[in-house]
Amino acid sequence: MSTNQKATAQTARNAAVLAALDRFRALNQKVGLLAELGLKESLARPPAERMAFLQSLEEARALHRAELNALTRVVTEYLGVDSAVWLKTLNEEVEIEVERLEKELHVAGWDKTGNPVVAQRKKS
């Protein structure tokens, strides 16, 4: 492989990484908005239920941060997975989480400003 071919291949890899990072940022923003919606819904609950909900969120946040840090280190440091592959996989997993949150929170779509639109729930 010539020097020009190597440079072209590296440029393509860099572009793929940047595209994956952009997608991750967009997905991360959606997760944040969906989390905010879930928290707003929890505020309508009785105080004891709100406290249990918030406690479970804090526990999950701490555990998931530790798990993600450990997995990232294993994948990148020990297994030597390319960053583009790692970001592609991460984006796929975040997309799954966005879809789960959308379903759980009854999101019908997203408005023009990027905020979730909640479907009208049928009254019992």
Image (tube, rainbow, N blue to C red):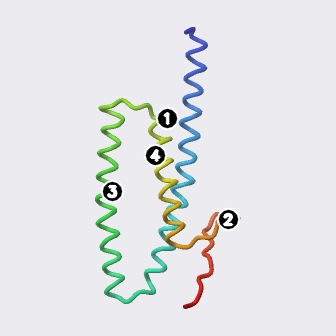
Q: Helix, strand or loop at disc 2?
A: loop
Q: From mark 3 to mark 4, how far is it between C-alphas?
A: 14 Å
Q: Which residue is mark 2?
A: 113
Residue 12: x %, y % from top left: 59, 27
Q: Tell me which label, 3 or 1, sits earlier in the chain.
A: 3
83 relative to 109, above or below: above
User: Relative to 105, is 47 on the left or the right?
Assistant: left
Q: CA distance from mark 2 to mark 3?
A: 29 Å
What amino acid is found at the position of numbered circle 4 in the picture? Leu
Q: Which residue is mark 4?
A: 90
Question: From this viewpoint, which residue is outermost toward the right?
Answer: 112
Marks 2 and 1 in Cβ contact (< 8 Å)? no
Instruction: Say which mark, if any, is on residue 64.
Output: 3
Q: Is residue 62 above or below residue 67?
A: below
118 relative position to 53: left or right: right
Which quadrant of the figure contains the C terminus? bottom right
Mark 2 or mark 3, earlier in chain: 3
